[in-house]
Amino acid sequence: MNQRLNLSTLALSRNRPPSPAAAPVSNKARKKAQRDSPEAVLKHKLDMCSRHGQVVEALRIYDEARTNGVPLSLHHYNVLLYLCSCGGEDADVGLGRGFEIFRQMVEDKVVPNEATFTNAARLAAASADPEMAFGLVKQMKVFGIEPKLRSYGPALFGFCKKGDAERANEVDAHMVECGVVAEEAEISALLKISSEMGKGEKVYEMMQRLRSGVRQVGESTAEVVEEWFKSEEAARVGVERWDVKKVREGVVRGGGGWHGQGWLGSGEWKLANQREVRNDFAQFQEWLQRHGPFDAIVDGANVSLSNQHYFSFFQLNTVVNQLQKLSPANRLPLVILHKSRTIGGPAQNPKNKALLESWKKSRALYATPPGSNDDWYWLYAAVSCKSLLVTNDEMRDHLFQLLGTNFFPRWKEKHQVRVSVSKLGLNLHMPPPYSIVIQESEDGRWHVPTTTGDDIETPRQWLCATRARNTK
């Protein structure tokens, strides 16, 4: 019966125009079919496990898929390897099964990608086997895969944890060879192990790499740097005498802020940190946002004492009036003064009291709170408002000099207004951006800005290292 029906159908098909074998499938139906396929369902389940860190459940789903003959794709295997390498409460289970899954992937002839090798390297590192992790990275070339920075982490950090500086440096060299640029975490780890092993030249190299590639460092890296400068080896390395001309040429050649001639000086280093009170400065930032921007910022104490043996409100007011005339909007500049300057001494004079009160009413005066550093405030205001900064302070003897001698001088040239006083009166010398960067000074000192606390925008803490005794 069936055969005859088939034959009849075939006979009819010879006499009639051909008809479509099946009705066309809509895009919606096709997408639904794809979404409901065993492979897609498996992908969704594993993705949910990855989102919630459910290693054991992902392994159960994997076993079930293998039993049911569901083919696994590269994505499936990568999610499983990622979960197994993440550690956590089920770390032991994940490690054991992770290698098994990786071997199964190889047997299934699923072509790996960078994520596959990176996850496998993480499994190796979690098993305290950085050699295997490094070997996996090297194998990536066989598959024509370019390693990423994350690919090297398991091997690099693994060797550093084991105290194997030589192998850690080999990983670093392989990164350089493959064009992979290390970031703060990697450089910090290399700096730490170099410091612990007493490798002064390597520490110097890492400090230079931090300076050029990272510029400002996090708190953990700052602690590593600090430990180095406290060490006996840091006190030992360095030259007693050096070619000053060669060092200066190095500074010029490098654009300022570093010379690259190695550790200068010898003996113990003195360390200093400086922090700004966070809440006080945050209040100033909010105040400035409400009442700024200003065309000019005045370092009130510096201007009042310029060429004077006493604090002169008259001189300060003269500068304020000149700046107001120079303002396109005829606006008063912002005067920054420490609170003590606004309530004691010459501030008690009735004329000066009236002057201060008029500035306050015009929102042209900000009194910095006790315990704060005026310098942070006026320099932040100048940078934030992109305005002129009126001060004779050359910023050589405090932390602003540490922010970068390659760019900061250019910023000063464009923004700093100096004040001079002569028999003809007071004159403003108008200018004819601000960089935060690790600094190596000409006499061998190191200044390391961090992202902890506050700088002009973010870091407020600097680590400063200088020899306990000056040598040359």
Image (cartoon, rainbow, N blue to C red):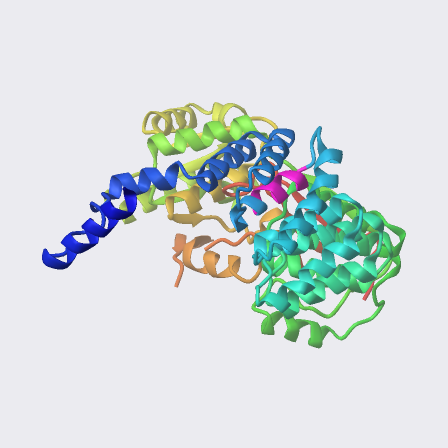
Q: What residue is at 57 percent from the left and 64 percent from the top?
A: 145
Q: The N terminus lies in which quarter of the figure?
A: top left
Quarter occupied by residue 365: top left
Residue lying furthest left in this view?
16
Q: Position of residue 298 (x, y in %)?
A: 43, 42
Q: Is residue 221 visible?
A: no
Q: Is the magenta region chiefly helix, strand or loop?
A: helix
Residue 51 located left or right of residue 17 = right
**Residue at image point 76% right, 75% down:** 243
Of residue 276 and residue 146, the one placed in the foreground of this image is 146
Q: Which residues are magenta?
A: 78-86
Q: How many marks?
A: 0
Residue at the image position 15 percent from the left and 59 percent from the top:
14
The quadrant of the picture occupied by the C terminus is bottom right
* Residue 237 drawn above or below residue 313: below
Question: In this view of the protein, which residue sits in the foreground, 85 or 357?
Answer: 85
The reply to whether the magenta stretch includes residue 411 is no
Q: Position of residue 319 (x, y in %)?
A: 39, 44
- Tell me residue 310's x, y (percent): 55, 38
Give the left or right position of residue 41, taking residue 277 as reference.
left
Q: Is residue 239 visible?
A: yes
Judge by depth and name the residue closer to the eye, 161 or 135: 135
Horizontal and vertical percent for residue 274? Answer: 66, 39
Quick check: 364 left or right of 174? left
Name the residue located 47 percent from the left edge and 27 percent from the top edge: 283
Q: Is residue 199 above or below residue 340?
A: below
Pick whichever, 242 or 30, lies toward us. Answer: 30
Q: Is residue 288 left or right of residue 177?
A: left
